[in-house]
Amino acid sequence: MLASQVLSYLFQLVMSRTLPAPEFGLLNGLMAFSFLIAIPVHTIQLTVARQTAELAVSSGYARVRRYLRGDLRRTTPVILGGLVAYLAVSPLLASFFHSSLLPVLLVAGVSMVGLYLPFAEGVLQGLQRFRSLAGTILTRYAGKLGFGAMLVVAGMGVEGGFTGMLLANLVAVLFAFALVSFGFRSAGQQSGAAADAAAEYPRDAWPTLLTYACVVLLLNVDVMLARHYLPATGAAHYAIAALLGKIAYYLPGFVVTVMVPKVASARALGRSTRRLLTAALLATLAASGVVVLVYTLLPQQVISILFGARYASAETATLVLFYSVAMLILSVLYLEVHYLLASRLTRPLYGLLAGPAVALAIMVSRHGSGLELVGALMMGLLVGLLVVNLLVIGLRRSPRVERPPGQ
């Protein structure tokens, strides 16, 4: 995952040095929007990984295979219906982003193909086959850099960047499902009797979807609004600050990937999971804290080295620092909600709705500068984190709530 983030940032470095500032701002605005479209990706992977971890312990691989096939059959009509709806509103989206129609349509292709990847990656994650999972992640990001950079350097502009992402997603999907199929064949028909049972639809899929919707909104809505409200060059500077600041969020991402199946498996076996949460929290704070420290000491130097001196203004340096602090808060929130999801303790997660509601309300009313947008984002994150923890404490004290095994 660390290597994939390096590849992702190399992609952005190529884009920032190859594209004019207005086009670079457009690229990042549309990428932020594509993350909103891909909210189900995170929902699918978390749900599949958690269910796979539990079924592998209780029923065996045959049940996991049946569960995966059932999920694919149920989800495909929804994906296709969403694509039709997206195509209908694409002219409005092009107007919002001050863009031509083609980049907006390419975003649809990238997102649709990407929606199939978390099914396979979720199975690999749930079975704790982290080397295979690492292979699919690296394939996607290496393809994004290779195809995207090649097409942009060839003169295809923003359209070339999104075409490269589309090709990378296609290759990664094929590779991921090949690994899953090979894994099932090598495992044989373990616990074959369980395969005849009806496939289960997770009862907490909606809280999972809501959780990722809130997190992805908090992670991306500001970049979209920066593209809409700020001047084109200002939006590009804001995109630089967001890219650098989000390192504090992405760096500890591997912690969640490892923690989720371990917590789900421990819960299924009735074991305590508190030590897992403590270790994950310390690792997350350490990784994010290092990034914040670097931006406190050397913000302009980092910007100049990575993206060029034209972006290394004092205002952008301040944006980078504040953005990294916001992302440290988000990384803690992201870890906590994943722990709750893996533990199937989902009721407190509805408190996350307060976060994007507060952030959006402030951004819409105060958007004259990048600092105002970052301040609104930080306020939304703090509110979301506070409300979730208040609900956790309140529900623990409620005699009507049963705590999961091992909690």
Image: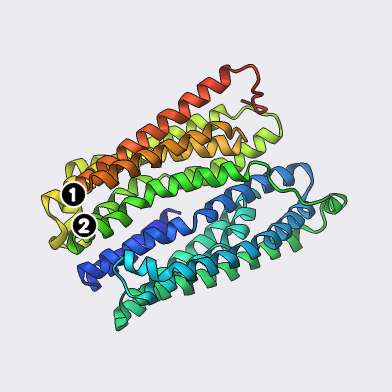
From what the image shows, is residue 330 above or below residue 86?
A: above
Q: Position of residue 79 (x, y in %)?
A: 59, 64
Above or below, comparing residue 53 to residue 81 in the picture: above
Mark before the other along the chain sequence, 1 or 2: 2
Quadrant assignment, res 226: bottom left
Which label number is shown at residue 369?
Answer: 1
Measure the C-alpha gap from mark 1 to mark 2: 7 Å
- Where disc 1 sits, the SS reads loop
Label 2 near label 1: C-beta < 8 Å? yes
- Residue drawn 65% across and 34% down? 266
Report the amino acid beneath label 1: Ser
Q: How many marks do you count on the picture?
A: 2
Q: Extreme bottom residue here?
A: 154
- The dot on residue 230 is 2
In this rendering, would 69 be left or right of 136? right
Residue 207, image x, y percentages: 57, 41
Query: What residue is at 11 percent from the left and 49 percent from the top?
Result: 314
Splitting the image into 4 quarters, where does residue 133 fall? bottom right
Q: Position of residue 85 (x, y in %)?
A: 52, 66
Tell me the crowding category of disc 2: few under 14, some 14 to 19, or many 20 or more residues within 10 angstroms, Cα based: some
Q: Compare residues 283 and 176 and report the one nearer the observer.
A: 176
User: For the point 49% across and 65% down, which residue is it?
Assistant: 111
Quick one: quadrant of the C terminus? top right
Say if residue 159 shows up in the picture.
yes
Tell me which amino acid carries mark 2: Leu
Secondary structure of the residue carrying numbered label 2? loop
Q: Is residue 158 left or right of residue 174?
A: left
Of the numbered discs in the image, which one, if any, rests on residue 315? none
Counting from the top left corner in percent of width and height, residue 60 is at 78, 49
